[in-house]
Amino acid sequence: MSRIPPPMAMLAELTHRCPLACPYCSNPLELEAQERELSTEDWARVFAEAAELGVLQLHLSGGEPATRRDLTDLVRAARAAGLYTNLITSGIGLTRRRLEELDAAGLDHVQLSLQGMDAELADRIGGYKGGFARKMQVAGWIGEIGFPLTLNAVLHRQNLHQLPRALEMAQEMGARRIEVAIVQFYGWAMKNRAALMPTREQAREAEALVAEAREALKGKLVIDFVPADYHGDYPKRCMNGWGSVGLNVAPDGSVLPCHAARTIPHLDFWSVRDRSLREIWYDNPAFNAYRGDDWMKEPCRSCERKAIDLGGCRCQALAIAGDPAAADPVCVKSPAHGKMRAMAEAFNAEGARAELTYRRYA
Ligand code: SF4
Ligand code: FES
């Protein structure tokens, strides 16, 4: 028996295709072409393997998963495998009829993203005219059909002032949960650090507001909060630990411990086209590279917080400190922490003048 526990959750990135053009997109710079996407049959097999491996929750994501014409078949396959299914969507591409079909196929939950809390800002950030109005219509259908709903709002310099409105909207829509995520800089979002980096004041205000709202809305709305990395003192427990509770399957079938893992050049990620999910989870050296704490260097190795944050994010350690086994530079103990702070200040100084660079799937 292996001592590595099985994963609980799987994120299936069904496609990189997406009608929106969000500047904060965390998908990689190189998107997968439609021709390289796994087929319906491939995904159905992967879902069955995931359930057999011990996965309980399946998050269907993208890109925009609704761009897959076979989405209903995929949900049906996931349900047949016994997985709890959550659709992560911008709402674009969903009609009432399609949502009813998804309901009949066994979809359990919907997570709807918000780019802004009014049409002007939401359409500007999403780079999609009319997107907000469509999304509000979809939110109405989600409520009428009775799907449990989570809202997801990525907040940054340009929309953080709308956080109170996001919390109101969650209550108006009957959401059970809202994810308030201050923008994280991975993939495409790296290009927009100046335009999106919240100021230190904004970051602190958001923390205070969330703490207050959590108290006031206890029992009514669950608020998950991802604080602003570059202004923090200690890192997030990224992915709850590398190869620990979850895995991502990219559109081409590569299996990753996190969405940015392919930025770590020395790791070789195996594909479900060639191997079973079980073999990949337990035996791919890339999954074992940062499991546990044997890989840690100082200051993490002897740190009293290492069981709390597991040294933070490997991908961010690589991006800023140049070493994926280093402490996440968000940490005050990291030798690269000063560099990160200086970067935040420089991006903030540039912020008011910086233009958004939109992501377009071509
Ligand atoms: Fe976490 Fe490492 Fe910083 Fe300690 S030194 S708080 S383990 S990142
Ligand atoms: Fe890769 Fe954090 S995003 S470990």
Image: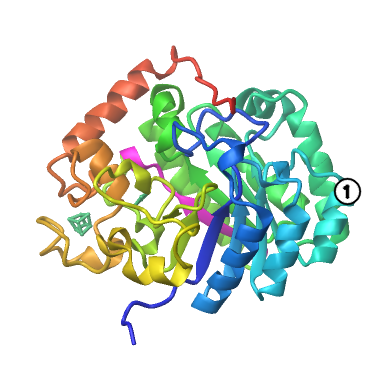
In the displayed structure image, the side of residue 212 where residue 169 appears, left or right: right
Residue for point 25% across, 69% down: 292
* Residue 160 on image: x %, y %: 53, 34
Residue 123 found in image quarter: top right
Question: Residue at the location (61% across, 49% down)?
Answer: 14
User: In the rendered view, how is the structure colored?
Assistant: rainbow
Q: Residue at x 84, y 48 (%)?
A: 140
- Membership of 204 in magenta stretch: no
Which element carries disc 1, helix, strand or loop?
A: helix
Q: Which residues are magenta?
A: 220-230
Q: Position of residue 130 (x, y in %)?
A: 78, 26
In the drawing, does residue 176 fall left or right of residue 155? right
User: Label 1 crowding class (10 Å Cα cut-off): few <14, some 14-19, many 20+?
Assistant: some
Q: Nearer the viewer, residue 260 or 195?
A: 260
Apparent side of residue 67 relative to residue 339 in the rendered image (left or right): right
Residue reaching furthest to the top: 353
Residue most toward the front? Answer: 274
Relative height, residue 74 to residue 327 (above, below): below
Q: Is residue 56 visible?
A: no
Q: Position of residue 362 (x, y in %)?
A: 59, 25
Which residue shows up at 77% across the image and 51% down it? 173
- Residue 321 relative to residue 353: left or right: left
Q: Which residue is mark 1?
A: 96
- Tell me the kind of residue under disc 1: Arg
Up/down of 67 relative to 278, above or below: above
User: Which corner quadrant of the image does residue 255 belong to?
Assistant: bottom left
Report the number of numbered marks.
Answer: 1
